[in-house]
Amino acid sequence: MAEVAGVDVELYVRSLLGGFFRGDTVRHIVQSAREVFFSASDRLFREGDAPQFIYFVVDGEVLLQKDDAEPWSFGQGDVVGVLDADAGDAHRRTAIARTDVHALALRVRDWHDAQEDDLEVVRLRLVGNARSLLDRGLSLPPSFGFEQEVSLGAPPSLVSQMSLADELNAFERLLSLRLAPAFHLAGTQSLLELAREAREVRLAPGEVLFAEGDEARSFFVNVTGAASLERQGMEMTAQFGPTALVGGYMGIGQVTYPATARADTELVAMSIEVAHLFEVMEDHYDLVRAMMAFMALERIRVQDAAPPVAERPRRRSMAAVAIAPDWQKHLPR
């Protein structure tokens, strides 16, 4: 890539990533990416396929489509396919170029390598995603993007076998984290380190787990029972049962808790400090993958309720940037 073009592309990619990545990491992403062009109606990827690339949209519009669902629209400055890459699962929608599209394609493995080499960006992305999810969720009363309700029946069989009448032992703490969907991709060692520092919380019906406006230092894994959210001046119907994070991402990215969590039944939960979560992430990238997947699935749920719409134009176009010819390569579709 020509030097001037490389600098311009680097600045552009940095703007797409919200300034999260350090210069050397952005350069690594730019060097690993390839410029691609799609004609209107071309398919970038298909629902059900394993994610291979994420696409930084330089120009044009891409639709993510799914049967019986409203399409998601992405345009200049958006990153397409990143949620499925973070979730570590098959594509949930098919991506179609609505117009001619100019993009930068980055292999998923290079995307993960860039984050593993720059864990500060992981912290920034998690915090940024949590705040963004809250902002979007506030436009979706009364569920606020969460599941509207959960079953109050018997907890998962493994949970029901715990000696919940007494303080949780080391194995039960580990098992509680292992059962939580938020930690599905995490390894045993990272969960052991989280469980070691977790604080057990037991509440009677009506008692408060965390209060709106309190300093948000921890998040909470529900072991058994149910809790719901309250927010001043708003009706909320979100409820959280066994194995869920109470309040989902709340407490991970906010300075103060944006709502109050109150026990609906007798509740046993584990409180984990966010600072400790990031400490464990430094040594265990599997925990990074787990939390990124959790955040991606949360965003997918919210975007199903409030589909994104491309805004044009939002960022400086690179259409006129001169890029070295040997960098202009189409990837096989």
Image (tube, grey):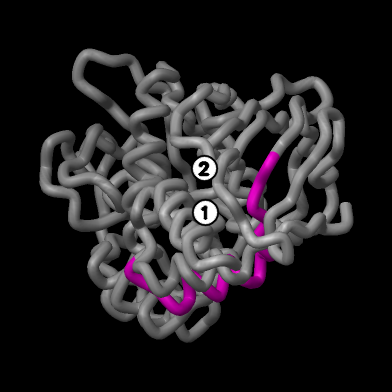
Three-letter amino acid code of the residue under disc 1: Phe
Residue highlighted by disc 2 = 298
Position of residue 63 in the picture relative to residue 294 (left or right):
right
Residue 112 location, x and y as percent?
57, 70
- The residue shown at (30%, 52%) is 252
Q: How many marks?
A: 2
Residue 289: x percent and y percent?
53, 67
Q: Are marks 1 and 2 in contact (CB under 8 Å)?
A: yes
Quarter of the image for residue 141 reads top left
- At which x and y percent is residue 93? 76, 38
Q: Residue at x 75, y 26 (%)?
A: 99
The residue carrying pointer 1 sits among few (fewer than 14), some (14 to 19) or many (20 or more) residues within 10 Å by Cα, namely many
Question: Looking at numbered disc 2 in the image, what kind of residue is underneath it?
Answer: Glu
Residue at point 44% right, 40% down?
Answer: 240
The one of 275 and 243 positioned closer to us in this rendering: 275
Identify the residue under disc 1. Answer: 294
Does residue 47 belong to the magenta stretch? Answer: no
As drawn, is 58 to the left or to the right of 203? right
- Where is residue 181, by image quadrant? bottom right
The Cα atoms of the two marked residues, 1 and 2, are separated by: 6 Å
Bounds of the magenta span? 102-120
- Give the residue drawn at x 39%, y 75%: 281
Q: Is residue 34 visible?
A: yes
Q: Nearer the viewer, residue 104 or 139?
A: 104
Q: Is residue 279 left or right of residue 296?
A: left
Q: Position of residue 122 (x, y in %)?
A: 40, 64
Asked which secondary structure carries label 2, the reply is: helix
